[in-house]
Amino acid sequence: MNGFGRRTVLCALAGGSVAAAGCLGRDGDSDGEPGAGDGDGTAFGTETVAEGFDVPWGLTFLPDGELLVTELPGRLHRLDPADGTTTEIGGVPEVHAVGQGGLLDVAPHPEYPDPPWVYLTYAATNGAGESTTHLGRGRLEPDGTRLSGVETLHAAEPFVDSTQHYGSRVAFGPDGMAYLTVGDRGFKDFGTDHVSQDTATELGATLRLAPDGSIPSDNPFIDDEGVVDSIFSYGHRNCQGLAVHPETDELWVSEHGERDGDEINVLQRGGNHGWPIAHYGCDYGTDDPVGDRPHERDDTVDPAYHWPCGSGGFPPAGMTFYTGEAFPAWRGDLFVGNLAGQYLGRFTLDDEVESAGALLEGRGWRIRDVAVGPEGYLYVAADAEAGPIVRLVPA
């Protein structure tokens, strides 16, 4: 068990209601929206930075303050938050934009712009039409209009005939290594033979790679013949959020459950995070539990926070720890995008993870990703056709 323990979310909190009266509209309307659920009095306004994106999926800031935005169909944009101008970046690799596949996450090299590598995760196919999650990179040209020297660094094995559960986020840890989440591709054979429990595959796992795509010699399973060398942790279903804790350097993920059973996890080096042999969710359309309850086992890692079967769940997406100065009361809090619930979830992290409520409710925005800007504002991507990029600013 990690230091945050287990926390069951009540169904009322999963819906996380914020009073509609006094809530802000778009484009910096008057009045503030109170901090959701904890009464801290934090007020914020919302501003539309840019709109018209086709299912924006990933956000990341460059050191110069500009924002990179991925679109699921396979486009990458550079966005100037100051005036909202966007530039499409050429040279992006061909992606498999079918089902849940496409161009997914984006991250700069930790020492960007020297070297000027930009990393992408995406779904792509082999010659047989099967697909898998890829990690690639290219150099962002000085004028910011094109990636050059694009190369595939890693393709998760095996390729399969599915368009579900690719993951996928990429983040650089404090060790300078690239951590890549790979989904379980939607396999339903719940048991010990499931791909997420089969460490001879890279499905349902978090991978640890060097920035050039090679396998670090100190990976946890490097000397285990039955485990793929790239695996850092396994037993995952579909992690679509990944962030490094700013104080502990731990890697945190948000993970989709089966029926509810959504989780926030602190990754454990070499750890089995349970899916599907240990899970708090149920099989879709039933009240039948999938596997044992995680607290009943001592061979799997308990989630830091979870939504049990029947709670309504929290279909999670991108996440970030707030480290800015614009909202002092939020420093150290975790923000996680909610898809079906259409809000931004806020969580406090004291002795344990606690829900602090919901922001941006009632606007019809599936929150796909969230990032902290250099001025301390929170930027969010709404996952929709003609989706906007909006920011939360002090009221």
Image: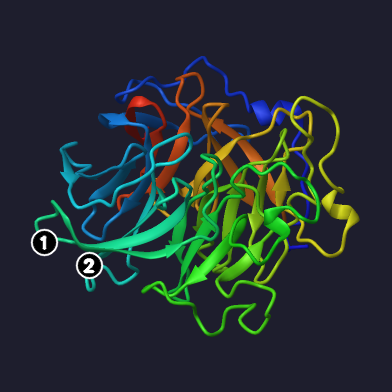
What is the residue that sits farthest to the right in this orientation? 296
What numbered label is drawn on residue 152?
A: none
Q: Secondary structure at mark 2?
A: loop
Amino acid on which the number 2 mark rests in the picture: Pro
Kindly identify the residue that appears in the image at 61 percent across and 72 percent down. 228
Left or right of 379: which side holds 142? Answer: left
Instruction: Name the foreground residue: 142 vs 324.
Output: 142
Instruction: Name the foreground residue: 93 vs 69.
Output: 93
Q: Position of residue 271 (x, y in %)?
A: 70, 67
Kindly identify the residue that appears in the image at 71 percent across and 34 percent down. 260
**Colouring convention used in this rendered image of the protein:** rainbow
| Relative height, residue 49 to residue 324 (above, below) | above
Res 139 seen here: yes
Res 118 seen here: no
Image quarter of residue 356: top right
| Mark 2 lies on residue | 116
| Relative height, residue 269 to residue 66 (above, below) | below
| Mark 1 lies on residue | 142
Q: Are marks 2 and 1 in contact (CB under 8 Å)?
A: yes
Image quarter of residue 219: bottom right
Image quarter of residue 44: top left
Q: Secondary structure at mark 1?
A: loop
Label whose residue precedes the other's in the sequence (2 or 1): 2
Q: Position of residue 12 (x, y in %)?
A: 72, 26
